[in-house]
Amino acid sequence: MLITKADAQSLDRQDVFAPLRAAFEMPPSVIYLDGNSLGPLQVSTRRHVAEVVARQWGEGLIRSWNTYDWIDLPTKVAGKIERLIGAPHGTVAVCDSTSINIFKVLAAALHARPSRRVIVSERNNFPTDLHIAQGLIDLLADGYELRTVDANDLPGAIRDDTAVVLLTEVNYRTGRKLDMARMTRLAHASGALMIWDLAHSAGAFKVDLMAADADFAVGCGYKFLNGGPGAPAYVYAAPRHIQDFKQPLAGWFGHAAPFSFVDDFTPSPSIQRMQVGTPPILSLAALDSALDIFAGVDLVALRAKADRLFDIFSSIVVPECPDLELVTPRDPELRGSQIAFRFGEAYAAMQALIARDVIGDFRTPDIMRFGLTPLYLSHEDVWRAAHILVEVMRDRLWDRADYKIRAKVV
Ligand SMILES: *Cc1c(COP(=O)(O)O)cnc(C)c1O
C-alpha cells in the first residue's frame, strides 16, 4: 500500500500524541530516529534540572537531602518506572548503570541456585550483558560457564544444569522481540531463574513482569525513558525474592540504616538493598522529570502508533531500496519499537542521512537502525525520513570518502 504525504498528514491530525511533541526540545530541522539510543531532552526537564542545581544544590547545600527529600528520590523515580513494567510497588530500585545492575542480579541468581553452574544467554545479546556474565564467572572461579546460543536454540540450551537465564527482550540490532512469558516458563520448568534486560522495552510498549513471572529485571534510563545521557538505570526483583536475595555490592546505601554508621553490614529488608552508594541527584532529577510525560500515556496506544510508523517507513523503503535487507520482523508481536536494515555500506549510508538531519544509528557490522518513538515523532516525520533514505540509496549519496571515516561513538 502506497502511503502519500497527505495520508501521513491526515494520520497526524487524528494523533492523540501529537500535542506531546511540543514538550521536547529538538532542532526543528532534525528528524530524530535515535530515541532508542539516547532519548531527547524535554523543556520541563531542562527547567527542573536548572532549578535543582541553582536552588537545591546552590542554596540548600547539604540540607537538601532532607528539605528536598533527595534521600527518597530513587524510590520516587522507581515508582514511576514500576508502572511502565508491570512491577508492584516496592520491587524496583533506581541506581547505578544497567551493566552494574546485571552484575548484582546475576550474582543474586547464582547464589539462589548453588548447585548449578550454567548461565544461559543469547549469542548476539548486547555485549555488556555477556561481558558482565563472563567477568562474574571469572571472579567466582568456581566452575561456572556461560552458554550462549542463537535465539531459536534457547529451549534446548536451558537444562537442569542451568542456574539462570539472562535475556534481553528486544534485540538491539534487529529489533526482534522474545516471548517473555514463554521463555520465563522454560527457565522455571528447568529449575532456573529468569533475568530480563528491558533496555529496549520499557517506555516503548507495555511490559508486564508480574504476568510473565520474571525473577529479576534490569533496564536503562536514557533510551525510551528520556532520562539523559548516562541516566541512572533500574533493577527489579520479584516480590518472592525481595526478602532474601543476596547481591554482592554491599554498600552503605543498601544498608538497613545507612546513617547509623556501623561497621557491620545489615542489608536493607527492602528492594533498597540493590543500592550501593550515594545516588546521583542531578541525574535522578532529570530522569524524575523526564518520566512525568508517561503519566498520561496509554502504552497500548503508544505502541499502536509505533506500529503505524513502522508500516509507513517499511512500505516506502522496502520496495524502493532493493539493497537494504529488512532484518526486523514484520509481525508486531515479534518486534520492539525500531526498524533495522542490513547493508554493506550501512555506516556511510547513516552518515549521509545524518548529514541530511535524519538521525538514526549504525551497529556493527552492517546494520542501520531507526528508533520509532511516538511521543515526539509525527507520521509525516517518518514519511519524510523514509523518502530521504530512498534518495540516499537511489543516488548513492553515501558513496563519499568522508562518510566512511568511523567516529569513536557510532
Ligand atoms: C543500552 C543497553 C545496555 C546499556 O548498559 P549501560 O550499563 O547503561 O551502558 C545494556 N543492555 C542492553 C540490552 C542495552 O541495549
Image: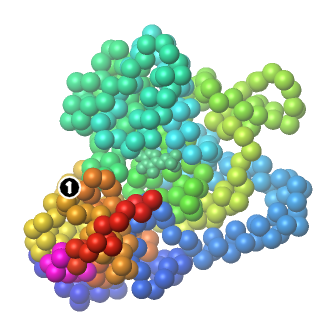
Looking at the image, which residue is at 56% across and 60% down?
229
User: Which x, y percent locates residue 45?
Assistant: 63, 70
Please say whether residue 332 is visible from this viewpoint.
no
User: Which x, y percent locates residue 191?
Assistant: 38, 18
Looking at the image, which residue is at 27% across and 52% down?
365
**Residue 191, placed above or below residue 62:** above
**Residue 26, placed above or below residue 304:** below
Q: Identify the image's colour scheme: rainbow, by chain, secondary structure or one colour.
A: rainbow
Answer whether residue 395 is magenta in the image.
yes
**Residue 207, placed above or below residue 289:** above
Tag 1 residue? 327
Residue at the far bottom: name it: 6
* Image quarter of residue 204: bottom left
* Viewport quadrant of the N terminus: bottom left
Report the magenta residues as a range: 387-396
Q: Amino acid at mark 1?
A: Val
**Which of 136 and 316 lies nearest the eye of the viewer?**
136
**Which of 224 and 333 lies nearest the eye of the viewer?**
224
**Residue 75 horizontal side relative to residue 362, left or right:** right
**Residue 8, placed above or below residue 108:** below
User: Which x, y percent locates residue 11?
Assistant: 29, 81
User: Which x, y percent locates residue 129?
Assistant: 43, 38
Query: Is the residue marked by circle 1 packed among few (<14), some (14-19), or many (20+) residues within 10 Å?
Result: some
